[in-house]
Amino acid sequence: MNMLLSSIKNNLEELTNLLNQLSNDEYATPCVQLTNASIGEHTRHIIELFQCLENQYESGILNYDKRERNTLIQTDTDFAIQQIVSIQNNLDKENKKIVLRQMIDGNEITTESNYYRELLYNFEHCIHHQALIKVAVLMSDNIKVDENFGVARSTIEYRKQCAQ
């Protein structure tokens, strides 16, 4: 489990490093390549899913639809970074059963899960949105991201094997 926690923290650190390079204007401006979403909106989505898991952990009932949708996260890089640091500092929890609830096509779906499984989901979800963010970032010459930013860990491992 420590490997997963370490990977999540490192991944979120990559996101923080990116946010430190962006002005609030660059962060909040809609991007045509992201169907007019901003880097900030994608970052808020990542953060708020992690926050749902953290805030609903005690109850054992998790519903990702019940996000705050705090626009400050998507417009203020410093505030977003504070939220990321808080997530990084609060990931290490005991594994336990969690009931996942979600509305799909007007019906509430309920399924069993657990904390570690949901951490893994959030990690993969984060990478997916970072891949989208990378599309916007690559349009700018002055922003640097790691070549593996937004790349699935299995893809990174596969590329390493191919290079040998």
Image (cartoon, grey):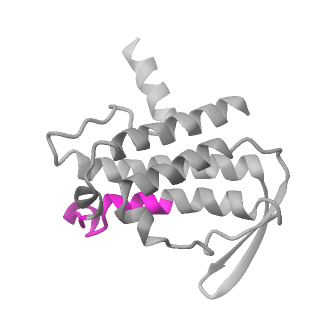
Q: Residue at x 69, y 53 (%)?
A: 118
Tell how many labels.
Answer: 0
Report x, y in % for residue 162: 40, 19
| Residue that lies at the very extreme toward the bottom in this rendered image | 106
Quadrant of the rendered image containing residue 49: bottom right
Does residue 93 sit above or below 41 in this rendering? above
| Residue that lies at the very extreme toward the left in this rendered image | 141
Asked if the magenta segment contains residue 36, the reply would be yes
Quadrant of the rendered image containing residue 77: bottom left
Q: Residue at x 21, y 44 (%)?
A: 138
Report x, y in % for residue 80: 45, 55
Does residue 163 sit above or below 62 in this rendering? above
Q: In this view, does 137 lie to the left or right of 6?
A: left
Q: In this view, does 111 lie to the left or right of 151?
A: right
Tell me, yes or no, if residue 19 can be seen here: yes
Tell me, yes or no, if residue 41 can be seen here: no
Foreground residue among 161 and 54: 54
Foreground residue among 95 and 78: 78
Q: Residue at x 23, y 56 (%)?
A: 26
Quadrant of the rendered image containing residue 54: bottom right
Q: In which quarter of the image is the C terminus?
A: top left
Q: In which quarter of the image is the N terminus?
A: top right
Report x, y in % for residue 24: 28, 58
Q: What stretch is highlighted in magenta?
A: 29-45
Does residue 112 sit above or below 78 in this rendering? below
Report x, y in % for residue 31: 23, 63
Asked if the magenta segment contains residue 40, the reply would be yes
Q: Residue at x 46, y 49 (%)?
A: 81
